[in-house]
Each structure stands twice: as structure tokens, then as C-alpha cells.
Image (cartoon, rainbow, N blue to C red):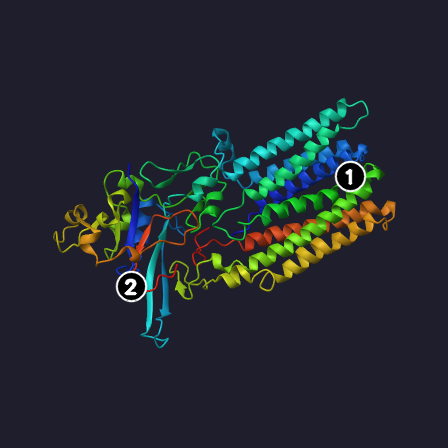
Amino acid sequence: MEIQWPLILFTFFNCLASGIFLVQGILTLAGKGKAMQLASCVSAIVALAVGGLAVFFHLENPLRMLNGFGHLTSGITIELIFVIIFGIAVVLYFLMMRRAEDGVAPKWCAILAIVVSVALPFATGDSYLMAAIPVWDTMLLPVYYVAATVMLGGFAAMIIAGATKAEDAVKLSSTLAFIGTVCVAIVTVVYAVAISGMGEHYTEMEFYFDPTLPDVPMRGAEAAVTGAIMTGEHALAFWLGAIVIGCIAPAIVSGLAMVGKIPADKVLVAAVVAILCAIIGTIVWRVLLYEVAVNALIQFQWAN
Amino acid sequence: MANYAIITDLNRCTGCLACTVACKAINGVDVGNFWIKTLRVGPHPIEGGSGTFPDVEMYFLPVQCQHCENPECVKVCPTEASHVAEDGTIQIDKDKCIGCQFCAMACPYGVRYLNETERVVEKCTMCEQRISQGELPQCVAQCGARARFFGDLDQGVENFEGPAHPDSPGCQYDEMTKTRVKLKDYVEAFTENDIHHLTNKGNDPKIMYLLREGRKWRE
């Protein structure tokens, strides 16, 4: 399938927004990160808004949403509902924080933050589950989005903590970043292995010809999908981009920060480097999921 | 109401692409886009044969919107632009389409695409404008091999209709287009086992393909 950059950016920023709010919720529950609450709320809303802006570049007639968006079996509708709930939860957290005498949002707000921050990326992933595209039609997709949320949130929280001098939040943030990165690595590899075993989902014709595309070679599931990621044409992007840069490098940085091996004045820089690597990795993986998003009747390549 | 579908006798289809061309002409489908395409499947070696010509088999496969019983495109549409019409066909209300293209992604057959000019998704309508007036879909009416038949599944596939052979009413075009023949009266005998559907991903495609014993269905 043609790579849909607005949707890739939308899902990425959804994970980033959710991650920032998720880690802030965990920090608040642990009695840490007081100084970074406002910055976290603002960052989460900004990330959500940027994601929303990105998706507007995908929709051809976005204003028609106003005519009706009420088809509840649609994953997009469910996703939109969770986006709205997430936005309300962030505003609620902010208001309760401002109302609190000690300047810290109450625990129930922290729990709400955690719940909505897991629900949003899960709903985002769930909206892409469709039988027509076997590589998307697996629970590994929403699970990956949740794992990426923890990873991105951990690194973003390290940066926010560094910028707001919330030293008490660094250790927990880096721990969450490390856990999230390890989870992303595991889910990505498991996902890639699962894709390599999805051959039975595709219609196989040994020989065929599409007279409207006479210069396009025949396609098979092995080359286009099952063998493409780990050993095929996308192997370099997968192993170097998604695994080495996207998982191993951030895991090393977050692991060192977690055990206190990075000096306090270097944590911010290290977190910026790590999140850049994590972003490269997660974007590469999301692009690869489009590259191998071939429908069941693999022999047909229509105008789209 | 009705439950319209199309069946193609693949033993008759010659791959002339008349359906593809006729569809584009009557529905104004842009250059580069198609509402129906015809794939050549094969030639494949016949089982037990020499592995080379003449021990090979092939058939042509016209693929369009399958107007499914449980259409995934309808399930994922956030605005109900894609919907099941009263006649059982799947239609798109272009005024409701926001162009999210999730229906195009959810279709197992990839038969939907974004119309770049109108900025909405479109696909085969089974010539709604014609069948609502009792006419045949253009791909059926113009089928060069008399391989395509249209009808109401509730009336039985054997009663699906196509245009009569030009020789029987005479060679006048108007007379020919107004004369119908039924599937059971026109094509060679077939059984239920000879009727095939494209790969079913839970969407239950309604468009049917007739391929009799002796040639292997590759879906």
C-alpha cells in the first residue's frame, strides 16, 4: 500500500501525547514530578493537536465530519471518541492540579491519566485491524502502539524533567523509558516473525497477467510480505532502523540513566538523543507496516 | 427488496476486456482507474501433464466490487457514506464521504480508490443508474462472450439474465439489447460445486464465478 504519511504521523503523535500523559500519571501516583505537571499537560495537548493536524492532511473532505460521525462500528469513530476523552482528561488533570492546595493533581486524576493514555493508543491500533490486510489484522498492532507509548513517554518525560528541573522524576522516567524500549523491541521482533508466517492469508497464483499493468512484474506473498521484512528488501531498514537505532540505542541510554551512570547535567542531552533514535525506529516500523500492507488478492494492483 | 449480483462463466470469458472498457465509458471512470479489471490467471501446468504446452490451463477473471453480504468497507466507514442499498448492492454516498480511505484499505480485493478530482472514494456501483430502470449493468450488457449474467440472488442464480445472442433475435442492436436469456438456458450445464467466489475474509462476496471441472479454481 502507498505510504500514508499523515496517518503515520497521526499515530506517532497519538502515542507521544499518550506517553507524556501516561508517565506524568505514573509520576504523580508515585508522588514525583510535581514541577513538570504543567509542562507535561501542555506537551501532551500540543502533541495531540499536531497529530490532529496531520490527519487533516489525510482526509480529503474533513469538514464533512460535521455532517455526522456516528457510525459506532467504525474504528475511526471509536478512535475519535478516545481522542476527545483523552483531551478532556488532560484538561481535567490541569484544572485539578491548579485547584489543589499542594499544587499536585489528585491520585484519581493520575489513575485517569494512566487509563486514557493506554486506551488511546490501543484504540488507535485497533482501528487498523482489518481482515483484508493480514499484517495489520493482529492484536500485536495495538500492543505495539501501547509499548511505543511507554517508550516515547519515558524519554519525553526525561526531557521535560530535565527542562523543568524536576530531578525527582528522572529515575522513574528513565526506568519507564527502558521498560518501554525493551517492550517495543520484543513486540517488534515478535511482530516481524508473525508477519513472516502469514503466507496462508494470501491468494497465490503462480502465473498471472494484468493487461492494464503490462510492465508490472508478478507479485507473490513471499517477496511482497512474508519474506520482505526480516530477510528481504526491507531487511536493512528493519534491522538497522527499527531494531538497532530504534530499540538498542535508546535501551542503552535509558538503561544507563536508570542506573545513574549518566551525570545529571548530561541526562537531558542523552534523553534528546535517545528519543530521536526511538522516533526514527518507530517511524521506520510504521512505514514498514505500510510497505507490507498488501490485501488478500495480492495479484491485483489497482490505481490506488 | 432485491439482492442483486453478477455471475461470470469463466469457461466462456475470452478476456476481451469489453466489460472493463464499457464500464469506463458509461461511468466516466478516469484514465488510470478501473471499476472492473480482467486478470489472466495462468497458464498453469495441468496436474499430471507434461508441464508444458499444450498441457496447460488458464482462465480470465473479471474483478470488481464484490457487493459483499458483510462488507468490511461499510463497517469501517465513519460517516455511513458506504452503505448497503435496498437492492443489496454496496453504494457510496459521495456527499458523506470524508475521504479517509479506510474503506479502500478494508476491501480485501482493493477495488476502491480515491477519485483525485472529486476527492471521494469510488468503485463499481453495479450500474445503479441502469439496474434501477430494469436495464442490465453495462459490463453484462456489453460482454463480448455472453459470459456475464445479472440477477437477483433471491430468484436463484439460474435465473440470472444476460443479453440474447445476436443471432436469435436478429442482428439489430436495439432488438438484441431488449432481449434477455437466462443463465440456465444459455450456458453449459453446471453444478453448485462449479460456482466460486473470491477469497472470503468474512465479508461473504456475492459476485460469482462459474468454472467447471477440468480447470482448477486458483482462489
Rate crowding at label 2 as few (under 14), some (14 to 19) or many (20 or more) other CA atoms within 10 Å.
few
B29 relative position to A28: left or right: left
Query: Does residue A214 sit above or below A304 in this rendering?
Result: below
Query: Does residue B1 sit above or below B61 in this rendering?
Result: above
Give the residue displayed 54% in from the left and 36% down from the top.
Answer: A78
Give the residue displayed 75% in from the left and 52% down from the top.
Answer: A251
Subunit ID for the residue under disc 2: B
- The answer to which image quadrant residue A35 occupies is top right
Marks 2, 1: nearer the viewer: 2
Q: Which residue is mark 1?
A: A160
Amino acid bearing label 1: Ile
- The answer to which image quadrant residue B61 occupies is bottom left
- CB-based contact (under 8 Å), mark 2 and mark 1: no
Q: Which residue is mark 2?
A: B213
Q: Secondary structure at mark 2?
A: loop
**How far across and down, in percent of the image, does residue B82 sit?**
42, 39
B54 relative position to A205: left or right: left
- The one of A20 and A266 positioned closer to us in this rendering: A20
Query: Does residue A143 sit above or below A35 in this rendering?
Result: below
Amino acid bearing label 2: Glu
Query: Does residue B50 sit above or below B159 in this rendering?
Result: below
- The one of A22 and B181 positioned closer to us in this rendering: A22
Subunit ID for the residue under disc 1: A
